[in-house]
Image (spheres, rainbow, N blue to C red):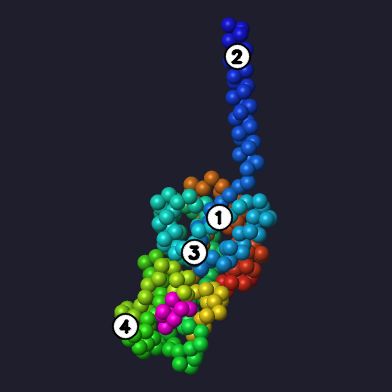
């Protein structure tokens, strides 16, 4: 009996030691987070991520796309810790399905919609936003798909407000995200396109014709929110906070986003 007790005690000690060792290993392993961000945030987030990693030791893995597409991926179980959207609607949807932590939601940037053409076209010859119904029939206008791309949704709202949406429908080319719109115009596949001011800022192959009146569409704000199933919420929340701090806001401003201050 005494030997049995000693054996059991030894087994228990070994088990506890193994658990303790495993916990210590997990504690010492570098933390990683996965950030799903709207395509328009690509350059800003790719610059911010390594700076955050250097400061905190937390590696930031990123995936970019239209806000609607990313939200659907999260709904289907994609392993995401932080969602950075270009439209509050998709964040609302995740909150309603209890897939995101409402108390962590915060806006960190804003933007504007601009009308662009390929570089080299005379601005005097370019049509204005309100005269796009004069675009020749063989030419196309690129916009993000309004059903999944916030920039496309904002553009549709504005065109409907000035009663041009129905007139232009046959000339519209839908893109999977705002960066594809930019590519269509850069290559000359589309004569005009609607992108964010931040996207126009990074391209040397397009020119801005004009900003779309912000009163013609819903406010363009960028909310960030933690995903409920995240196992690294502290680190994900720290990255979101980083984007709202001076260094993060400077990066966003550099790429054409509107920020506080």
* Position of residue 69 measured from the top left corner of the image (x, y, whole percent): 41, 61
Q: Quadrant of residue 128?
A: bottom left
Would you name the residue on which mark 4 appears?
A: 167
Distance from label 3 to label 1 (Cα)? 14 Å
Residue labelled with disc 1: 61
**Residue 107 appears in the rendering:** yes
Identify which residue is drawn at 59% across, 19% down.
11
Name the residue at the bottom extreme.
124
Q: State yes or no: discs 4 and 2 in contact (Cβ < 8 Å).
A: no
Quadrant where the C terminus is found in the figure: bottom right
Mark-to-mark CA distance, 3 and 2: 58 Å
Alpha carbon distance from label 4 to label 1? 43 Å
Query: Residue at coordinates 61% horizontally, 35% vertically from top-left?
Result: 23
From the viewer's perspective, is residue 127 above or below residue 199? below
Contact flag, marks 4 and 1 (Cβ < 8 Å): no
Q: Which residues are magenta?
A: 184-194
Instruction: Name the mark nearer the viewer: 3 or 1.
Output: 1
Q: Nearer the N terminus, badge 4 or badge 1?
A: 1
Distance from label 1 to label 2 (Cα)?
A: 46 Å
Residue at 56%, 49% (x, y): give it.
Answer: 233
In the rendered image, residue 84, in percent from the top left (x then y), is placed at 51, 60
Looking at the rendered structure, the secondary structure element under dot 4 is helix
> SS class of the residue under badge 3?
strand
Mark 4 or mark 2: which is in front? Answer: 2
Name the residue beneath numbered marker 3.
38
Q: Which residue is mark 2?
A: 7
């Amino acid at each position: 009996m005494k030997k049995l007790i000693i054996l059991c005690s030894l087994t228990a000690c070994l088990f506890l030691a193994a658990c303790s060792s495993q916990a210590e290993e997990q504690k010492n392993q570098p933390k990683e987070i996965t950030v799903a961000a709207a395509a328009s945030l690509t350059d800003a987030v790719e610059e911010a991520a390594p700076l955050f990693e250097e400061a905190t030791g937390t590696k930031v893995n990123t995936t970019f796309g239209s806000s609607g597409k990313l939200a659907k991926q999260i709904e289907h179980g994609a392993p995401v810790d932080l969602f950075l959207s270009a439209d509050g609607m998709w964040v609302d949807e995740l909150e309603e399905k209890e897939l995101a932590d409402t108390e962590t939601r915060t806006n960190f940037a804003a933007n504007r919609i601009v009308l662009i053409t390929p570089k080299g076209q005379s601005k005097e010859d370019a049509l204005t936003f309100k005269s796009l119904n004069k675009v020749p029939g063989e030419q196309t206008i690129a916009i993000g798909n309004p059903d999944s791309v916030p920039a496309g949704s904002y553009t549709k709202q504005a065109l409907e407000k000035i009663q041009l949406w129905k007139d232009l429908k046959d000339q519209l080319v839908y893109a999977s995200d705002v960066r594809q719109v930019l590519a269509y115009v850069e290559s000359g596949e589309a004569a005009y396109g609607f992108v964010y001011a931040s996207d126009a800022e990074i391209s040397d192959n397009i020119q801005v014709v004009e900003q779309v009146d912000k009163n013609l569409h819903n406010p363009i704000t960028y909310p960030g929110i933690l995903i409920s199933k995240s196992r690294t919420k502290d680190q994900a929340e720290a990255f979101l906070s980083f984007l709202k701090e001076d260094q993060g806001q400077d990066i966003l401003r550099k790429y054409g986003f509107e920020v506080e201050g």
